[in-house]
Amino acid sequence: MTTRELQKIFKQLLSTAPLIRPVVSELYVASSRDRVVCEESSAVELQGIAVHGVTGARQSDAGGDWEAAVTFLCQREEAKGGRGGCKPAGQAQVRYPCRCAVPGLSTLELQPGSDGPQILSADSLYQLGRVEEAYRLLLSIGPNSPRAPVLARLALLQLHRGFLYDTNQLLKKLIQCGDTSCLRPLLAIAHKKDRFQLQKHCHLVAKRILESQRDESTSERQWDASESLLERARCYAFLGQRKTAIYDFSAILKDKPKHVQALCGRGFTYLMLNQQKECTQDLLAALLIYPDEVSKDILSLKDKARRLVCDWLYEFCLLKLSQTLTCNEIPVSEEQLREENVVCGTMLKTETRDPRWHLLCVDLLLAKGDVKTAGTQLVQVFGQEPRDAVAQGRLGVTEAWEQKYCSAALRLSKLTDKHVDVLGSLLQLIPTNQRKRTAQAAAAEASRVSSSGQWEQALSLLTVSVQAVGNHKLQYLRQRAACLAQLGLHDRAISDLDRVILRHNSPPCGEDELKIQSEDLCRRGKSLVLTSKEGLALEDFTKALGLHRDQAVECIESGLGRIRAAECFLKGALQNYGEQQLDKAWMLVECGLAMDSENAELRRLRTKVKREVASPCNVN
């Protein structure tokens, strides 16, 4: 290299100093500014030249003249008799502002054994467009040098020269080194064209590795940061680093909230973490933007994962529909059912054999009041007379809309055995007036079948009545409690009567209401006795006798029986007498005698209690 060429390189280097400042900072680590050690063992003369060269450069630097420093270095080149290609062996601390960089620049010529100045020289040659010389200079660096900075520059130069295979091999070695931090300062000085080409090349290779089984063209895709983030996030997900993958997906969505692939990717990552709420939210957001692409992504999942996604989306639709129907009267507007319609429409394409989505589609049509279309779809999918109880229930809803109340009640009653929760949601699809009429028809039909001893069918019909109106009409609860008692289901009968008794007016108004309340207490007392809860039963019987004695005696006599009731009162009275609770014992004895006035045990106990209460020596 001639003196003129060397001077030209240094001048170009000085003019681009702000660009290569990150590289200088990387390559020249802290070392003493006043010590420059030459590693060339056989040339004592070069050590002297290095010392004098650095001293001269510092003197020029003290004058603040960069050009003078470079000129001095060139003069030293001529003084050596044209000897060129000397490279630094040590490292000098480079600081800024630029006046402090002269000692570092002088080492480019005077320290031939150092790697850092050679790399910096290669960067300068690259800036001048002399790529071949820069490439040869980097190849000449010894094997003991820092590998990552050299590999990164070789990869960039090979890509610039068009050798893609060599570029790939160098990038692999760079990744295996585990130190990619050197890329940031290198890319800061790289030409814009080369930087873009490197980004595009790396993205293509990563995508080809990740999607090796796909054969799709990616040459026309837009290469931006979000695409690379997306591929990296997918790599993290496949490697099991799911939280890191979510971080990358979220970074994309921060700038592009409607990025469908990022939404799906994050949703599927949440799926792997079994986070149902977050997964459903992301997939729903993606479905509202581009349902066709989301359906393809769902179909690409494994069977187990796909089923789980479908289950979560179905649960979301049911919950959302129930909330909408609770807050709004039937029929509901199209806009209020937008999310459910989008999810259902997409799932019908991906899960055509799953009857749940067809039934949900019918539910959405009924919610909008489109009864005719709902009935047509039911017949097309499930036939004129569906075998499935849940399909029968939907047909019952359409009949309730058409005011065929008795038939609707019979169809809906088929859901009470195994699908009570479905019954409640289907009743929400019937307008309020038609729902009340359906409840009345079910109760009337229950009375008819119970008279012939068909208690189980009566129970199913009464369940429809209770579900249709809730606690608004207590008579349906009373009827069902009586039916349950007939079937021996006393715990459920007690539960229904609890709901009835909680609605009792306090104090009751009118004799008819007193009779009804007394009868409710007696019915519950009977079921309590039959479930071995005699203490609670005696409380109910006592309250009933206090409200309306004649009605209570009549109800107990027709239910539990006078003798059985008297025995219960005797047992309770004896227990209280033994505990010296004489007031309670006396009250129970009186109630027992009201049931059976001829009971000798009750009479004797009443005499004992009366004697002890009257005795002045009563000790508790």
Image (spheres, rainbow, N blue to C red):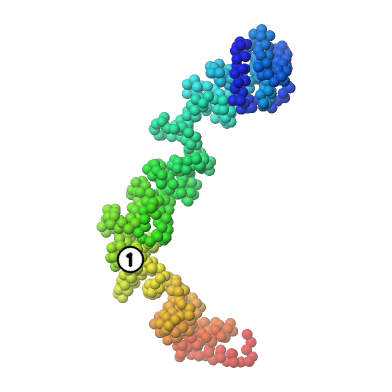
Decide: is 545 above or below 186: below
Looking at the rendered image, the quarter that the N terminus falls into is top right
State the count of labels.
1
Residue 216: image x %, image y %? 39, 33
Give me the residue at 41% from left, 34% from top.
213
Q: Residue at x 48, y 84 (%)?
A: 546
Q: Where does residue 595 sit, x and y in percent of width and height? A: 45, 86
Residue 70 appears in the picture as rendered: yes
Q: Is residue 405 left or right of residue 204?
A: left
Q: Which residue has dot 1 on it? A: 434
Q: Nearer the viewer, residue 82 or 268?
A: 82
Q: Residue at x 47, y 43 (%)?
A: 257
* Residue 382 visible in image: no
Find residue 489 and report its horizontal and vertical position in percent: 41, 71
Question: How many residues crowd mark 1 within 10 Å: few (<14), some (14–19), many (20+)?
Answer: many
412 shown above or below 204: below
Q: Nearer the viewer, residue 179 or 482?
A: 179
Q: Residue furthest front?
A: 64
Identify the image quadrant of the C terminus: bottom right
Q: Secondary structure at mark 1?
A: helix
Indicate whether 469 appears above or below 603: above
Q: Amino acid at mark 1?
A: Gln
Depicted 609 relative to depicted 422: above or below: below
Residue at 43%, 83% in the rendered image: 510
Extreme-left residue of the structure: 384
Residue 513, position in %: x, y? 42, 80
